[in-house]
Amino acid sequence: MGKHRWLLVVLGIIALTLQGRLWFSQDGFSKTRGLRAAVAEQGVQNEDLRKRNQALDAEVVNLKQSSEAAEERARTDLGMIGQKETFYQVVPTAEATF
């Protein structure tokens, strides 16, 4: 019976050593938890980018199918003016405000 007891003690020490390495080493449980958090964060970023890409795809389709959309985009983003349009720029007066 003494041999079995020593075998159980040795097996117990080995099990405790492996558990210690699992919980406290740099490649153990804490790293796994950190990697899971990074994967979750990347998933959120991917979803945001997926939504942005869908909006851009819809805008591209709209610009390809409608000349009005392209004209509106040229006006707002590029400051372009149509041939039969007149551009008026309103400049505020230079009054000092204190």
Image (spheres, helix red, strand yellow):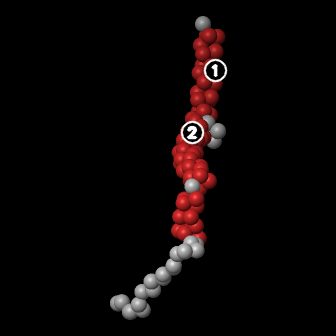
In front: mark 2 or mark 1? Answer: 2
User: Could you give the CA–CA distance between mark 2 and mark 1, rounded to whole angstroms?
Assistant: 34 Å
| Observer-nearest of 81 and 46 | 81
Q: Which mark is residue 10?
A: 1
Estimate how packed mark 2 is, as few (under 14), some (14 to 19) or many (20 or more) residues with alpha carbons within 10 Å.
few
x and y percentages locating residue 12 in the rendered image: 59, 21
Q: Is residue 62 visible?
A: yes
| Observer-nearest of 82 and 59 | 82
Which residue is farthest left?
A: 98
According to the image, label 2 marks what residue? 36
Q: Disc 2 marks which amino acid?
A: Arg
| Quarter of the figure with the C terminus | bottom left
For mark 1, give the secondary structure. helix
Q: Which mark is residue 28?
A: none
- Name the residue rendered at 56%, 49% in the picture: 58
For mark 2, give the secondary structure. helix
